[in-house]
Amino acid sequence: MSEEYEEVCALVPTRNEAATIADVIDGLFEVGVGHVLVVDGNSADDTAAVAAEHGAEVVQQSGDGKGQAVREGVSLIEASYVLLLDGDGTNPPAQASRLLDPLVAGEAEHVVGDRTADMRPGAMSSFNQIGNRLINRAFHRIHGEDYGDILSGYRAFTAESFDRMFLSAEGFGIETEMAVECSRHNITTRVVPTTYRARPDDSETNLHPISDGARIILTLYSLAKTSNPLFYFGSIGAGFGTLGVALAGYVAYDWLLHGVSHEVIALVAGVSVLFGVQLLMFGLLSDLIVTLHREQTRRIERLNK
């Protein structure tokens, strides 16, 4: 076993992965990972039994969803470093050193495996790839960071940095939350290229592109309240302002050309514009408070170091 990875625990959330979990666990031990923890989401197949046979510690998930499994798993881990990967064989365990080496060397606190660097044929549908690109661009626009592939389930992090995160997502939104928290708390993050392989034919995905994608986008947008309040409140304010201007234009058009007045619509237009301006001002003030808070946090962290 590599002494470098003795303080590493691989966390593998699973649900009906009996066809692939053995290869994943064996591959992790081959690269020198000291401990493998499988959090089984009440699989209907032999996932838990196969994982235990191949030397992993297996615990039954107390709740539902990948997000809850990750939080529960990390709470049980005593190692300094955590390697997170899926149990479906899409994340090659042989590439674990790419993510772990920056942590062990103290160069990063969180490492994201960029699946788009080597996307194998059939690994992700064209529809999912388009959605993935849109979500990553939205993240970059809202939070100002480029983490390559924020939806990647192949990542590594220090236990200390995870403790600084506030995570509440139950399902696949956990990766999005972790990316946002890295940006919010100035967690040193590195992106490394990884391969993303197609699932075996006898392995079924637990991801539902439409519903899970919608939840991820909603999570990304809602978290902007505290990380980029100017964008969050400004976008809502812009929506109300645009509505108010459009209604005012209609009222003016109908009055000038036909002499018809719309007092109620005019009132709604005025309120919408006023509300939009107020939200924009609130966003500016909130952004100022968040910026000052971040500067104070950085000073405190430097003093602690």
Image: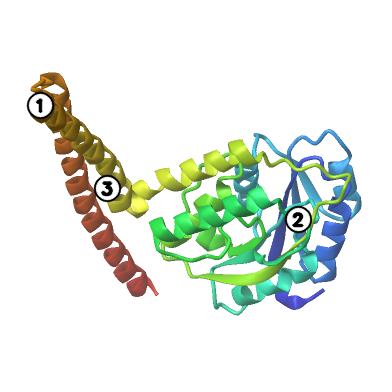
Task: Indicate which label's residue lies in the foreground, 2 or 1.
Answer: 1
Mark 1 — residue? 255
Left or right: residue 185 compared with residue 30 = left
Which amino acid, mark 1? Answer: Trp
Q: Position of residue 81 (x, y in %)?
A: 63, 65
Q: Position of residue 51 (x, y in %)?
A: 85, 49
Which amino acid, mark 2? Answer: Ala
Mark 3 — residue? 234
The reply to whether residue 76 is visible in this rendering is no
Packing grade of label 3 (10 A; few <14, some 14-19, many >=20) is many
| Viewer-nearest residue: 249 or 245 | 249
Q: Which of the 4 quarters of the picture holds residue 170?
A: top right
Q: Which of the 4 quarters of the picture holds residue 190?
A: bottom right
Q: CA distance from mark 3 to mark 2?
A: 38 Å
Label 2 element class = loop
Q: Which of the 4 quarters of the picture holds residue 270?
A: top left
Mark 2 — residue? 123
Q: Do callouts 1 and 3 mark residues in contact (Cβ within 8 Å)?
A: no
Q: Earlier in the sequence, mark 3 or mark 2?
A: 2
Q: Quadrant of the N terminus?
A: bottom right
Q: Position of residue 30 (x, y in %)?
A: 85, 69
